[in-house]
Image (spheres, helix red, strand yellow):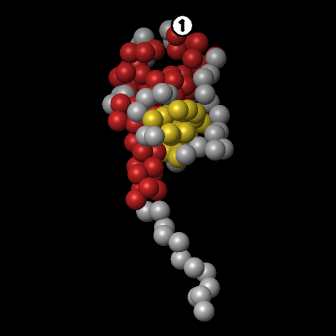
């Protein structure tokens, strides 16, 4: 584990639940244990805050922590272009067998953006509960 990965693992950034998040997206597979929940605060289609909860190895913690930093402040379009390779590059390097850990952030972001778009499209119109007389 290189020094930068170690730093992100030991001094985790933004790894907490965000109760007032605009949207949440999941990455990984809760069934096998490698899993993240990515919370986004979105303002005018820009990510103003990103946090995450991680169940996974130290590399999953470090890569997810780095991913929240990389996407914060970015318009959704730009954030969507940040890949697992960008996370690995930011951290310097990862062992080959740990590369998949860096993919959960981008996957969770895709799911969060999907949820965000669906919530905007599918906002229910208001229906009166009682018929008006
Ligand atoms: Fe599975 Fe890192 S999350 S090895």
Q: Nearer the viewer, residue 46 or 102?
A: 46
- In the displayed structure, 120 sits above or below 101; it is below
Residue 69 visible here:
yes
Instruction: Count neighbours of disc 1 (C-alpha within 10 A) and say few if under 14, some if 14 to 19, many if 20 or more.
Output: few
Q: Nearer the viewer, residue 63 or 82?
A: 82
Please state the horizontal and vertical placement of residue 89, each as a whole percent of the image.
38, 15
Q: Residue at x 57, y 13 (%)?
A: 6
Q: Residue at x 48, y 27 (%)?
A: 73
**Which image quarter: residue 46?**
top left
Residue 98 visible here:
no
Q: Residue furthest top?
A: 3
- In the displayed structure, 11 sits above or below 68; it is above
Give the SS element for disc 1: helix
Drawn side of residue 34 relative to residue 117, left or right: right
Please state the horizontal and vertical placement of residue 2, each as a whole percent of the image.
50, 9
Q: Which residue is labeled 1 in the image?
A: 3
Q: Nearer the viewer, residue 93 or 116?
A: 116
Q: How many marks?
A: 1
Q: Where's the C terminus, which quadrant?
A: bottom right
Q: Residue at x 59, y 88 (%)?
A: 132
Q: Residue at x 48, y 70 (%)?
A: 125
Q: Residue furthest front?
A: 133
Drawn side of residue 38 relative to residue 83, left or right: right
- In the displayed structure, 118 sits above or below 30; it is below
Drawn side of residue 31 relative to residue 98, left or right: right
Please state the horizontal and vertical placement of residue 13, each as a whole percent of the image.
60, 23
């Amino acid at each position: 584990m290189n020094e930068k990965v170690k730093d992100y693992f030991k001094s985790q950034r933004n790894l907490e639940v965000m109760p007032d998040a605009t949207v949440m997206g999941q990455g990984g597979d809760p069934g096998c244990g490698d899993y993240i929940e990515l919370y986004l605060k979105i303002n005018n289609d820009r990510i103003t805050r990103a946090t995450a909860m991680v169940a996974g190895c130290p590399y999953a913690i470090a890569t997810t922590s780095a991913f929240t930093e990389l996407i914060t402040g970015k318009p959704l379009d730009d954030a969507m272009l940040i890949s697992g390779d960008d996370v690995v590059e930011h951290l310097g390097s990862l062992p080959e067998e740990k590369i998949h850990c860096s993919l959960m952030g981008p996957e969770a972001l895709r799911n969060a953006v999907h949820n965000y778009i669906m919530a905007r499209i599918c906002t229910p119109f208001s229906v009166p509960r009682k018929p008006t007389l």
